[in-house]
Image (spheres, rainbow, N blue to C red):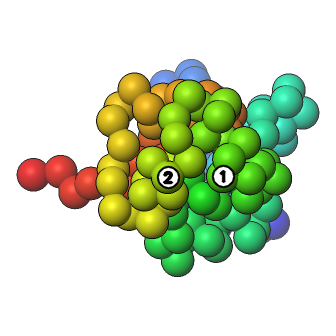
């Protein structure tokens, strides 16, 4: 950490620090906030889940495998047929919003986690 200067301008106290120190301070505050959310029970994803999603693997399949569910188990819990789930996982069908919501609920993820990013116009 470099030198920190205290200044008074118009009777008000200020602190002058380097941009690098400022960025370190902000990074520390953000890390503290993240750790607090994790300590409060927010789920984090293991690297293999993140990497699979980055590679473009089907999110439903990635989360189903992470939750250690068979396709039959997920389909039954979501109230759909196993072939329909298979079509969603293989990209042959997108699945209705209602079905994807049910799948997301069973997988304990947000609906946004299952839907690929779409570029906005």
- The residue sitting at the bottom extreme is 55
**Residue sitting at x 43%, y 54%:** 88
For marks 2 and 1, the one nearer the N-term is 1
Horizontal side of 44 relative to 55 (left or right) equals right
Q: Quadrant of the N terminus?
A: bottom right
Q: Which residue is mark 2?
A: 83
Mark 2–mark 1 CB contact (< 8 Å): no
Residue 90 in view in this figure:
yes
Kind of element beneath mark 1: helix
**CA neighbours of label 2 inside 10 A, class few (<14), some (14 to 19), many (20+):** few
**Residue sitting at x 52%, y 70%:** 57
Q: How far is mark 2 from mark 1, CA to CA?
A: 9 Å
The front one of 51 and 67 is 67
Q: Quadrant of residue 40?
A: top right
Horizontal side of 67 relative to 54 (left or right) equals right
**Residue sitting at x 47%, y 72%:** 56
**Residue sitting at x 78%, y 40%:** 43
Q: Which residue is mark 1?
A: 71
- The residue sitting at the top extreme is 11
**CA neighbours of label 1 inside 10 A, class few (<14), some (14 to 19), many (20+):** some
Q: Where residue 54 sits: x, y (%)? A: 53, 71
The front one of 98 and 51 is 98
Q: Quadrant of residue 34?
A: top right
The front one of 104 and 76 is 76
Q: Is residue 13 above or below residue 65?
A: above
Q: Where residue 30 sits: x, y (%)? A: 69, 45
Of discs 2 and 1, which sits in the foreground? 2
Residue 103, which numbered label? none
Q: Quadrant of residue 27?
A: bottom right
Horizontal side of 115 relative to 82 (left or right) equals left
Kind of element beneath mark 2: helix
């Amino acid at each position: 950490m470099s030198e920190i200067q205290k200044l008074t301008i118009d009777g008000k106290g200020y602190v002058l620090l380097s941009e690098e120190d400022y960025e370190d301070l902000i990074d520390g505050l953000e890390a503290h906030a993240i750790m607090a959310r994790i300590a409060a029970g927010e789920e984090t994803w293991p690297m293999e889940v993140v990497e699979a999603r980055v590679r473009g693997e089907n999110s439903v399949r990635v989360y189903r495998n992470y939750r250690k569910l068979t396709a039959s188990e997920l389909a039954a819990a979501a109230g759909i047929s196993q072939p329909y789930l298979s079509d969603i996982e293989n990209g042959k069908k997108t699945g209705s919003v209602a079905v994807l919501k049910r799948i997301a609920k069973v997988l304990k993820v947000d609906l946004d986690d299952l839907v690929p990013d779409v570029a906005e116009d």
